[in-house]
Amino acid sequence: MQKSTPNIGFVSLGCPKNLVDSERILTELRTDGYNIVPSYENVDLVIVNTCGFIDSAVQESLEAIGEALEENGRVIVTGCLGAKEDQIRQVHPKVLEVSGPHSYETVMAQVHKYVPKPEHNPYTSLVPKQGVKLTPKHYAYLKISEGCDHRCTFCIIPSLRGDLESRSITQVLDEAKRLADAGVKELLVVSQDTSAYAMDTQRKEGGVKTAFWNGMPIKNDLMTLCKQLGKLGIWVRLHYVYPYPHVDDLIPLMAEGLLLPYLDIPLQHASPKILKAMKRPGKIDRTLERIKQWREICPDLTLRSTFIVGFPGETEEDFQMLLDFLKEAQLDRVGCFKFSPVEGAPATEMADQVPEDIKEERFHRFMQLQQEISAERLKQKIGQTLDVIVDEIDDEGIIGRTKADAPEVDGLVYIENLSGTPVKVGEFIKVTITHSDEYDLWGTC
């Protein structure tokens, strides 16, 4: 006889886009009356939301599935790796069901199949308007589109998540308002290609169409979306912004304070030859020129980027171009990845694969240079008083982030509360910076 309230275990892996998918599934589970339990024990079913972007992520996902099978035995798999069902079943033939990314309805149908929907009174277990969130209450990820139209040779995202499919501007703004009304102080806008938002709908509809939100006509495009998000009175941070020309139009919004002065642009490399092999835009001189213009318009702008070293065919000369670019661009926050072969990505089959020891050596040279740049840029903040959002309070003091720091990927501010004024998580406080290193800041309030 089935328990009146069945328990579902949930494992979420991968990037913030995947986290949003997990939040959506968890919200629907809670709405249907299921309990969500953070363990494998005493649960009727385990859902594993996987990542399949690079080989290490695939391995982590397969290990998580194996652990869930060993600990519980009743496992449903979804997410990016779910697009490769044969690969999963070859390793774990006992999984009950497999589905691909953002397959919310499929996952719920599978759950209902193995653990029938319980009878419950929705008024006794209310789901908040903003849904179930896996982030702290004061910040949330806002996913504005699925998929990607680019065909970068190192990436298999389009084969996993499909082509670009933008959410309607009214859907996005409704969700953003619900989150702001629920007390969220910072929205992190995410997608595979944020700057391509609504381009797919514009192609289908023959141009930018007008939608209605809050009783007002608004255009269904990125600029309008950013302006409307900026009116919510909370921090709005843009991630994964492909460097289209119209990105230039967003910088004045940052200077005005509507958006955080923060731009996450994955540039990937600086050698024209390597960028061409990657199928990425290759005009690095133009990129440097734009960075200079952006900083003239918005002097407080923080630039984050990611790069790949050891891409097939990368010579020492190509790598030196990348180091020279770093020195000139003086980016604030940088992530670096050693090229990783991915099944299905064209770059995996390219000639002139770079040996692992050379990848490793270049990775360390890259990171050493960027640490020096980052340390110098953070040192310039000593003596300044900055706005900081409080993420955590422990016995040693307050931990927070400035406008220049996204959660999980950027630096932190460690704060000594000299005033003794009570501080809560999620509050904004003024902090005077006293010390810095390569990644973090220290200060007092």
Image (spheres, rainbow, N blue to C red):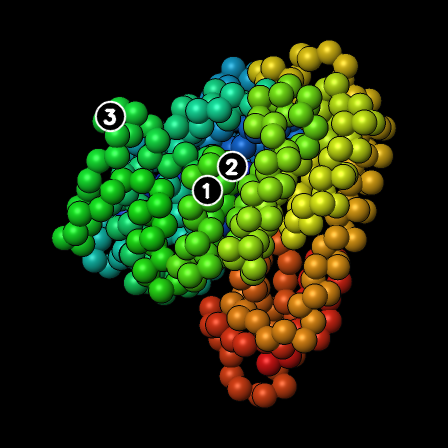
Residue 36 visible to the viewer: no
Residue closest to the eye, 161 or 401: 401
* Chain-order first, disc 3 or disc 2: 3
437 displayed left or right of 211: right
Q: Cβ–Cβ below 8 Å for labels 2 and 1? A: yes
The residue that mark 1 highlights is 247
Q: Position of residue 152 (x, y in %)?
A: 56, 23
* Chain-order first, disc 3 or disc 1: 3
The residue that mark 2 highlights is 243
Say few, some or many: other residues with alpha carbon within 10 Å of mark 2 (under 14 / 14 to 19 / 20 or more).
many
The residue that mark 3 highlights is 206
Distance from label 2 to label 1 (Cα)? 6 Å
Distance from label 3 to label 1 (Cα)? 21 Å
Per the image, label 3 sits on a secondary structure element best described as loop
Q: Cβ–Cβ below 8 Å for labels 3 and 1? A: no
Residue at x 83% of width, y 27% of height: 316
Q: Cβ–Cβ below 8 Å for labels 3 and 2? A: no
Q: Position of residue 119 (x, y in %)?
A: 22, 45
54 displayed left or right of 259: right
Say few, some or many: other residues with alpha carbon within 10 Å of mark 1 (under 14 / 14 to 19 / 20 or more).
some
Residue 147 visible to the viewer: yes
Q: Position of residue 380 (x, y in %)?
A: 70, 66
Per the image, label 1 sits on a secondary structure element best described as helix
Q: Amino acid at mark 3?
A: Gly
Rendered view: 419 above or below 112: below
Per the image, label 2 sits on a secondary structure element best described as loop
Q: Position of residue 77 (x, y in %)?
A: 47, 29
Q: Amino acid at mark 2?
A: Pro
Residue at x 53% of width, y 86% of height: 421
Residue at x 59% of width, y 81% of height: 445
Residue at x 27% of width, y 40% of height: 220
